Image: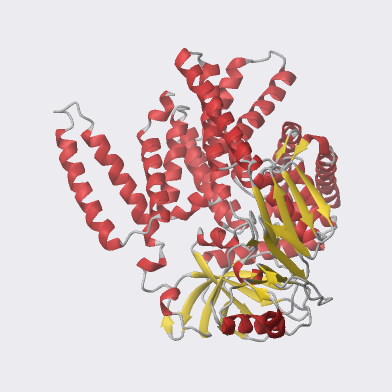
Amino acid sequence: MQQFNFISIKLSFFLIVGIIVGFYIEFKLSIIFPLLIILLALLGIAYKRKSKSGFPFFGIIAALTTVSIGVLVISFSNPKNNTAHYSNHLKENKSEWIVKVDEVLKSSTFSKRYIVNAKNCDGNKVLGKLVLNVSNDSISPSFKVDDELILIAEAKRTGKPLNPYQFDYQEFLQKKRIYHQLNISNHQYIITKTPSRTLFGYASSFRGNLIEKLQKENFGKEELAIIEALILGQRNAISAATYDDYKNAGAVHILAVSGLHIGILLLLLQFVLKPLELLPKGKIIKLIVLVSLLWAFAFIAGLSASIVRAVTMFTFIAYAMYLNRPTNTFNIIALSMFFILMIEPLFLFQVGFQMSYAAVIAIVWIYPKLQRFWYPENIVLRKGWQMFSVSIAAQLGVLPISLFYFHQFPALFFISNLVVIPFLGIILGLGALVLLLTILNALPEVVLSFYNFLIKSMNSIISFIAQQEGFVFRNIPFDSLQLILGYLIIISLVITLAKPKFKRLAILLLGIIVFQSWVLYKQSETISKERIVLIHETANTLILRQKATILEVFGSPTNFSSRILQDYKTGERIDSILISPLKNSFSINKQTLYLMDSLSIYPHQKQLDYLVLTQSPRINLERLLDCTNVKRVIVDGSNYKSYVARWKTTCLKRKLPFHDTSEKGAYYFIKD
């Protein structure tokens, strides 16, 4: 573990602590600046006296200073600390905006989506990012990066998830410091004629021209989509079926240009540029050319955040390889992390950043240990073992993160990676040639056919692996404490196997015991739980009744609600789901619930604790309330909005509690 004693690793750790603290606890800059100045002064004093005392005063102050820097850099991105942020200039209604397209997102069925930078709001120069949704129809144009639009729209906050355990899109955007979205139709904007250009815009235009050229070639549709993803970082054209195949085979990571691609590209360039070392000062020339080519690839791939992050990381690693000191690799990785987080601290909360660094650190740390464990003399076995070792190391590094975010484990990942990684090396190397020949309009048919066949073969193999459903474990419950304990177990396991000692084995066993105890505790919580929930879904009604590990669903689940049910099953550690017909009345802890649907049948009971209105019943609610004593009215997403508005007004007049699931989310009749 000596390699983890580098100062850069310690600094990165405390910087991360500061970023996390600053993100979840909002500090004013007027507090942080004076505190940081005081700590810097104390750091100087501690440095002069560190040799005079055995107490680690200097180390403690240095750690606190680094934590404070982390708090500071994350606080700079907080709009409350920046008067120029658009949120400080918003009105209650619509505003006039000038926005610049920063990123083109994948379109949905109903809208084309973009991330835009605000430049002006009601005549005030502002900054900050928003999501722009433009109604999707046959005549709506597609905007490009750097396009500037003038529009009138109301900035609306992104909503919280309306159902339990749904993906929290609001939290996802907030971790990118995006708080609002603008919704416009096809004719509610003006495109400025002379927008300012940025490097990102030039990169996006260059990539767009390459994609247009590739589309004119005779590639298959799915093969072209994979080429765009692997070489150009553009995944929008990949079909849902192909994406699911890669996900179920444990190879979805190759569809996003990331650390894996840049790492393979780095190794290829190291081999190709090796003759440069024969020149005077050849090693430094090779490093400069190598880094320049990596950044050229980043430019071709559109300079997205994930690509820039990966190329930055491997630029540092290329420098470590130039130094030819393997023990420095950890130091360089930590320095790259420190550098990236100082510039963009919000990267810390992105899954891609976490998985990239977890995989790289695991490979650098675990791979050499696996090679020392067994080194076959046979070259075929040796190369196979090396590929398998890289796959195992990377998978161990990302396993807890993958289970935490995706709750899925493809057991055949090692087979996928043994197939994909060699394919990927050839595809990236040959892809560079294909792109160059495409730009020159000189792509031979034989090269095109071979490249198309190569990618088609990879897709076929991945599809075959994905079809082995018995090896894909889905809906695995895994919370944040299990994430931490999972890494504790993996780290302890590797350390113990590398050099067995009683203390190391004790820590490993303790981690396993705590992990199992937590799982048993969560299971006991579920066994003692009873819950009834009205789910929000447009044009459908679903009521969930949970008793221990059995979930009974009243209603007819659709494709949309099936996903809600699977998320609920995972979050609550449910064993089985039963589907039952929807009933009109339920008894909840001696309380009565009556569900009135489109048949508008009045309840027989005169006392109702809950009245649930679904499927837009044509009733006079005031008359119903006059003849029935109702304590609470609840409406779900199956009702017309005009009906809901009328019912809400009636309840407000009578001061009767009213719950609309489209505004407040799912309703819990029995809470924990």
In the image, taking residue 606 as reference, residue 171 lies left or right, namely left
Q: On screen, 415 above or below 458?
A: above
User: Farthest front residue?
Assistant: 606
**Location of residue 556 in the rendering, given as x and y in whole percent from the top left corner:** 83, 60
* Residue 86 visible: yes
Q: Nearer the viewer, residue 58 or 219?
A: 58
State the residue in front, 459 or 377: 459
- The residue that appears at 56% across and 79% down in the rendered structure is 655
x%, y% of residue 199?
53, 64
Quadrant of res 200:
bottom right
**Quadrant of the snapshot with the N terminus:** top left
Side of 468 relative to 331 (left or right): right
220 on left or right of 270: right
Name the colour scheme. Answer: secondary structure
Query: Is 504 in front, or is 450?
Result: 504
In the displayed structure, would residue 184 be above or below residue 468? below
Whole-percent x, y for residue 313 in the image:
50, 44
Q: Residue at x 68, y 46 (%)?
A: 570
Q: How many marks?
A: 0
Q: Is residue 599 above or below residue 322?
A: below
Relative side of 60 to 627, left or right: left
Asked whether residue 214 appears in the rendered view, the answer is no
| Quadrant of residue 467 within the rendered picture | top right
Q: Residue at horizontal 46%, vertical 35%? A: 320
**What x and y, as percent, mark residue 449?**
86, 49
What residue lies at 66% left-to-right and 31% top-to-bottom?
391
